[in-house]
Amino acid sequence: MSAWLPRMRRIAAMMVGMPDYDAYLAHMRNHHPGQPAMDRTQFFRERQEARYGGRNGGKCC
Amino acid sequence: MTRHIPWILIAIVGAAALSVVALSRGEAVNALWIVVAAISSFLVAYRYYALYIGRVVMRLDDGRPTPAVRRADGLDYVTTDRVVLFGHHFAAIAGAGPLVGPVLAAQMGYLPGTIWIIAGVVLAGAVQDFMVLFISMRRDGKSLGELIRMEMGQVAGTIALFGAFMIMVIILAVLALIVVKALAESPWGMFTVAATVPLAMFMGAYTRWIRPGRIGEVSLIGLVGLLAAIVYGQSIAASSFWGPVFTFTPLQLCWILIGYGAVASVLPVWLLLAPRDYLSTFLKIGAIAALAIGIVIMAPPLKMHAVTQFVNGNGPVWSGGLFPFLFITIACGAVSGFHALIASGTTPKLIARESDAPIIGYGAMLMEAFVAIMALVGASILDPGIYFTMNSPAAVIGTDAASAAAAVTAMGFPIAPDVIAQTARDVGEHTIISRTGGAPTLAVAMAEIFSHVVGGPAMKAFWYHFAILFEALFILTAVDAGTRAGRFMLQDLIGLVVPAFKETASLLPGLVATALTVAAWGFFLYQGVTDPLGGVNTLWPVFGISNQMLAAIALMLATAVLFRMKRERYAWVTIVPTVWLLICTLSAGLLKLFSADPKVGFLAHADRFSAAADKGDVLAPAKSMAEMRQIIFNDRVDAGLVALFLAVVLSVLFFTIRSCLSARRDAQPTAREIPAQLVAAE
């Protein structure tokens, strides 16, 4: 039950297309150790551009 | 057996509620019966039909890695908790469509719309979303155009991409038209919507430099700003200086929106689009939840008739009879082809395991249908006199309270002029007469429901403008994002002929494609705004036809894939809705082209005007020969567009049949899925 609030935050963030930064860090650690990972701000900007840059077709009617 | 008992009970409750809704005559039915009927139908449909499709038709297999597992990169491909992903997918599919269509459909009474939404979503809409999600999930999350190319060939893929672009154009035009209709001559609404632009830019700067990435925080700040804008909007509207500054005619607003679309879609995304999307997404989810709670607390009786005389056609809101036009008027909410683009977008790249697909693909669409049901309830709790006053074109009911009251009363929905004037005063508008497009009607209904729960009658005007703002906000986001998406589609299409055009990084092709996209939807918007019948009348059916045709295309793809998987035994799951959509859209398209009734058929309308023009007559609503020629030209463009849609859908049908026949001749499955065993290597 204690995971309730973080989960709500993740739902809200994902509604606007922002994935979990910690999951990204974990992925980089496990699969690409030694490679530099983006910091939180870079990650935010990169994801923002990826979502809204246009390729994804945006929203529905 | 015992595990089925709760579901049998839910089914019985649903059937009972539906029969109350369907069979009561004379006495007012409570709106909650519709809500209960819808929810129970959706639960049973999910438990039995969605899971049947998942287990038997698709044979979902958790041993098969999803794209999020196979290609995990922490960015685009991420295994995501299914509740989180449900929110993501629902927020992407639910827009203005499910709110507007049902409001317009209420002119035939609440019963036809309710039945179509429930049956349509269960058998067609949710099946489509789920199937496309499944197909894309098994192919690395490829997009609809790529999927059609893979399974039905290059030509079919290109035709579908072209169709999708035209549909995007029509959607943008019709959404922009709804904003024009909602904000014209309404300084309060116009001010609040205009205030969101600097507000969003502030939020953009905040998340860019001050506190990067703090979406929740900045959204709260934005919300406070929005509420302040609504509150101050009232004084702005009342001011003798600022009131007129924010008062625009529909034509002025049309040009403002075209200019806005052109500029906004080339700005950096962090400045305007992204922050406004945060606001509109959270506001949308919040407003939908509040509407659901409000309806349950208020438990309003339905004042609209179950079925009105307009089922035979000749209704004032839109022309045409129940079949086929009801089924294209309510597109989003029952079945929406646009979702095929979303279900083959980001969602399939995020699914953690295959067994999550039913709740995401089928479940989120059921949720959208529920939103549509609430919009239908909203329109139906209003006095029908008010409903028809707001939704009939000025050409039918005039522009003052006395003429509107007389005309609407003559339709059989008695209303007094002072009730019309009082309703306008209650919601803080100059007039509610002929505020077509659905958004203002829904806003009046939401104001009714919200003020019942919070604030009483004194808060009605605030809630009305809150509702208008909420609708306008996400429509403007859609216009902006849609123009960008349209630009890329166009660059891909032109790139087939002129390869240099595909270069999305270089400036000139991008600007040209953006200008062409804006010009395309701007043309239809202008045409809609200057249309004497109010535009919605003409454009909404074209939008509905195009959206349902895209749905038919997606379902045809799904059918072809089932044949190529050698599962044609189960292909009825997609063939049944495909056939129904083809019947509806082809007959609606043909009627729009060839109906002899000038109110329905574009060509008949053009003929009537050109016959008059040849004799030198000027027919109302045209005031000059130039306007006559404009009307004739518009009719022919619309007719050409509908003919184009028909050609697209018929050619995809041809490719589907060819693909299915050739799959039957093959002994082995030919569907191009990523093989299950590839995983181990990764």
Image: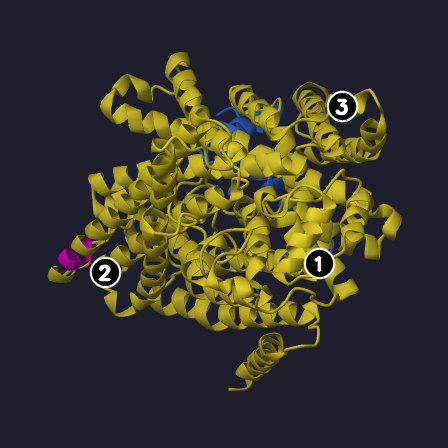
Q: Colour of chain B?
A: yellow
Q: Quadrant of residue B277?
A: top right
Residue B65, can we see it? no
How far apart marks 3 and 1 lie (CA) works out to 30 Å
How far apart marks 2 and 3 lie (CA) works out to 62 Å
Front disc: 2 or 3: 3
Say what amino acid the circle numbered 1 marks: Leu
Q: Are marks 2 and 3 on the same chain?
A: yes
Q: Identify the secondary structure beneath mark 2.
A: helix
Q: Pointer 2 and pointer 3: residues touching (CB < 8 Å)? A: no
Q: Label for residue B286?
A: none
Judging depth in this view, the residue of B562 and A24 nearest the camera is B562
x, y percent for residue B130: 43, 57
Q: Residue at x 54, y 47 (%)?
A: B97
Residue of label 1:
B382
Q: Are marks 3 and 1 on the same chain?
A: yes
Residue of label 3:
B244
Q: Is residue B648 above or below residue B22?
A: above
Would residue B63 be found to the left or right of residue B176 on screen?
A: left
Judging depth in this view, the residue of B58 and B236 nearest the camera is B236
Would residue B306 be found to the left or right of residue B325 on screen?
A: right
Q: Pointer 2 and pointer 1: residues touching (CB < 8 Å)? A: no
Say what amino acid the circle numbered 2 marks: Phe
Q: Label for residue B563?
A: 2
Residue stretch in magenta: B659-663
